[in-house]
Every structure is written in structure tokens, then in C-alpha cells.
Image (cartoon, rainbow, N blue to C red):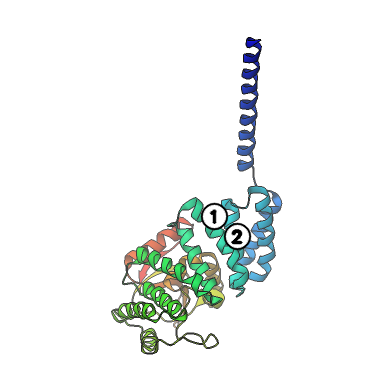
């Protein structure tokens, strides 16, 4: 009888091991299984429409792709996280920040769990979610994210960079809105020191932050701030046209035809807006003498900052050169 029991236990062990092995194979196959045609089609259509600036038209395709990704890969997979980010972004571009917010929250949770709190994608989501909160006047939620944006920019560009000053100013505005005048004053003073120390001081920003320091009175919601309180918000249409001072830029392309240059600027802004935003977005320098119309990003603090951006773009397949104009 003892021998029979022993054999029965061994058989049970073999059976359990076999079941677990089969389950592991199924899970592995599911993870490696190519995504469905429907998921691929919806995602590609949404992406194509997004790249041409048709954000409302792209929305239902990303929404459908999200549902399919959750079914095929799970609600916490990286694939699902990327689609959540895309869907949130098209909502944000339509000024529908209340709809964008929960998708940014979910995407941030997914990538913080898989990449940690310091990854580049996580930094983008922290910035975008902070904007979504600030646009809705949810400064209690926005304030800690704005602080993280400051740290990310300090790490990338150094504490004396103008972009860091703008992020610190945003912290000050959030603190002021929440009724913490001493904290707001500290942030405003730091932003002012940085802007005053720039080689070509930005008078409009300096005057705006001085007025905030002089008054430190909560701004009525209907009036809004004296300086945009949202860090790195893409301009409407994705293209910014202005003359640039002598500084470091990343040049992306040059066109003889002006209309072709405008279309290319819009396409590049939609493709790489998250990378361009810290440097002020895409800029189109229109020729006044019949030469090439140049598309670029800048000005940037120094050659190293421009070089870092150009290397990131080349890693994504976008040609670029660092120039000084």
C-alpha cells in the first residue's frame, strides 16, 4: 500500500508540473502573439490622423485601439500604456483636459511601474498630466507634478536654464493659487534671478514675475495669470514663427517653397512635439530674399543642449544638424 501511495504522489507531481509548464507556454505564446489586424489598423489610422493635426478624427481610432489592447494584452501592459498616452494627447490637443486626465494618470502608473520614476517617457507624462491638472485649475494635484518637472529640467539643462525658471514660475503660480504666498514668493524670486541673469533678458517675463512678487494676490480664475502658468504647452497648430537671436539651434530641414515649409513644420511638430517643447517648439524662419525657408528648434542654452536634442532625433530617424544663428 505504501508503494502505491508513493507512486500516486509522484504521478500527481508529474501532472502538476505538466500543467504548470503548459500554462507557462500559453502565457509566453500570448505575450509574443502578434496583435490583431483590428488593433493594428485602428492604431495606424489614429496615428496618421494625429500626424496631420486631425485630432478629433483620430480620437475614435485610438479609443478603439485602447479597448482592443486591453483585451489582447491587458490593462497594465506597455502597449496599452502607449495607446493611453496617445488618446490622452489627442484629447488635450482638443482642449478636453477632463477627458485626457484619467488616461494620462493610467499611462503614468503603467510606465512608472515598468520604467521607474526617471525615464524620459515618464517625464513627458508627468509634464502632460501637470498641464491637464493646471488647465482645470486642479493646482493641488498639479503642484507635485510641477515640482517633478523642475527636477527633470534641472537634470537635463542645469539650474540656470530659462526653461527651469519657467517651470519654477509655474510652481509659484500654483502655490499662490493655493494660498501659500511665502512659498509662491520663493519660487517667483528664483525665476526672476534666472531670467535677469540671461545674456538677453526676457523683459516681458521679468516684468510679469515682478508684478506677481509685488502683489502676490490670488488671481481670479476668470482673469488668469499675467504669464501662462503651464509649462511647455504646445502652441495652437504646432508651429511658431518668430525671428531668433544669435544662439544654438537644431535645424531639421530647409525648403525653397514656403507652403511646403509650413506643411513640413506642422508634420514635424506633430511627430516630435514632446521633444521640441522644452526648446520652445518648432520654428519656421521665413526667408525674405528668396533663399531657403529653414525649419528648426531653439534657441537653446548652449551647444551641448542642442547636441542632446539632435542625438535624440537621429535615434528616431529624423535628420538634423546643430547650427548657430
Apparent side of residue 301 relative to residue 145 in the rendered image (left or right): left
x then y, percent, for residue 144: 45, 68
For the question of whether residue 257 can be seen, the reply is no
The residue closer to the viewer here, 131 or 245, is 131
Question: Could you say which is closer to the camera, residue 316 or residue 196?
Answer: 196
Q: Which residue is mark 2?
A: 84
Locate residue 139 relative to residue 11 in the image: left or right: left
The extreme right residue here reads 38
- Residue annotated with mark 1: 110
Of pointers 1 and 2, the one earlier in the residue sequence = 2
The answer to which quarter of the image holds residue 45 is: bottom right
Q: Is residue 285 above or below residue 118?
A: below
Q: Residue furthest front?
A: 1
Q: Within the image, what quadrant is residue 180 found in?
A: bottom left
Q: How many marks?
A: 2
Left or right of 101 in this view: 241: left
Residue 259 falls left or right of residue 291: right
Horizontal and vertical percent position of residue 1: 66, 10
Q: Residue at x 56, y 72 (%)?
A: 263
Q: Dots 1 and 2: beta carbons under 8 Å?
A: yes
Q: What residue appears at the point 28 percent right and 79 percent down from the top-left corner?
A: 197
Residue plotted at (64% across, 58% down): 44
Amino acid at each position: 500500500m505504501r508503494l502505491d501511495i508513493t507512486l500516486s504522489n509522484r504521478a500527481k507531481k508529474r501532472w502538476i508540473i505538466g500543467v504548470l509548464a503548459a500554462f507557462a507556454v500559453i502565457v509566453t505564446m500570448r505575450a509574443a502573439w502578434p496583435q490583431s489586424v483590428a488593433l493594428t489598423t485602428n492604431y495606424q489610422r489614429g496615428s496618421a490622423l494625429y500626424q496631420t493635426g486631425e485630432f478629433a478624427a483620430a480620437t475614435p481610432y485610438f479609443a478603439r485601439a485602447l479597448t482592443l489592447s486591453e483585451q489582447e494584452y491587458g490593462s497594465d501592459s506597455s502597449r496599452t500604456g502607449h495607446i493611453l498616452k496617445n488618446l490622452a494627447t489627442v484629447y488635450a490637443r482638443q482642449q478636453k483636459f477632463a477627458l485626457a486626465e484619467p488616461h494620462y494618470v493610467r499611462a503614468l502608473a503603467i510606465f512608472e511601474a515598468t520604467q521607474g520614476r526617471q525615464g524620459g517617457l515618464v517625464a513627458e507624462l508627468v509634464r502632460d498630466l501637470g498641464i491637464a491638472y493646471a488647465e482645470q485649475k486642479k493646482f493641488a494635484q498639479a503642484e507635485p507634478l510641477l515640482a517633478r518637472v523642475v527636477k527633470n529640467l534641472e537634470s537635463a539643462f542645469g539650474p540656470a536654464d530659462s526653461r527651469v525658471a519657467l517651470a519654477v514660475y509655474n510652481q509659484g503660480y500654483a502655490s499662490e493659487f493655493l494660498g501659500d504666498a511665502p512659498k509662491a514668493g520663493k519660487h517667483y524670486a528664483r525665476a526672476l534671478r534666472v531670467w535677469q541673469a540671461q545674456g538677453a533678458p526676457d523683459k516681458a517675463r521679468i516684468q510679469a514675475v515682478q508684478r506677481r512678487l509685488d502683489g502676490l494676490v490670488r488671481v481670479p480664475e476668470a482673469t488668469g495669470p499675467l504669464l501662462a502658468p503651464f509649462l511647455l504647452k504646445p502652441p495652437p497648430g504646432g508651429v511658431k514663427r518668430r525671428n531668433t537671436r544669435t544662439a544654438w539651434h537644431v535645424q531639421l530641414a530647409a525648403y525653397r517653397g514656403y507652403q511646403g515649409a509650413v506643411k513640413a513644420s506642422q508634420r514635424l511638430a506633430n511627430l516630435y512635439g514632446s521633444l521640441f517643447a522644452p526648446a520652445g517648439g518648432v520654428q519656421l524662419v521665413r526667408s525674405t530674399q528668396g533663399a531657403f525657408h529653414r525649419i528648426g528648434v531653439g534657441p537653446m542654452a548652449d551647444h551641448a543642449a542642442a547636441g542632446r536634442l539632435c542625438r535624440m532625433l537621429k535615434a528616431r530617424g529624423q535628420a538634423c544638424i546643430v547650427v548657430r544663428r
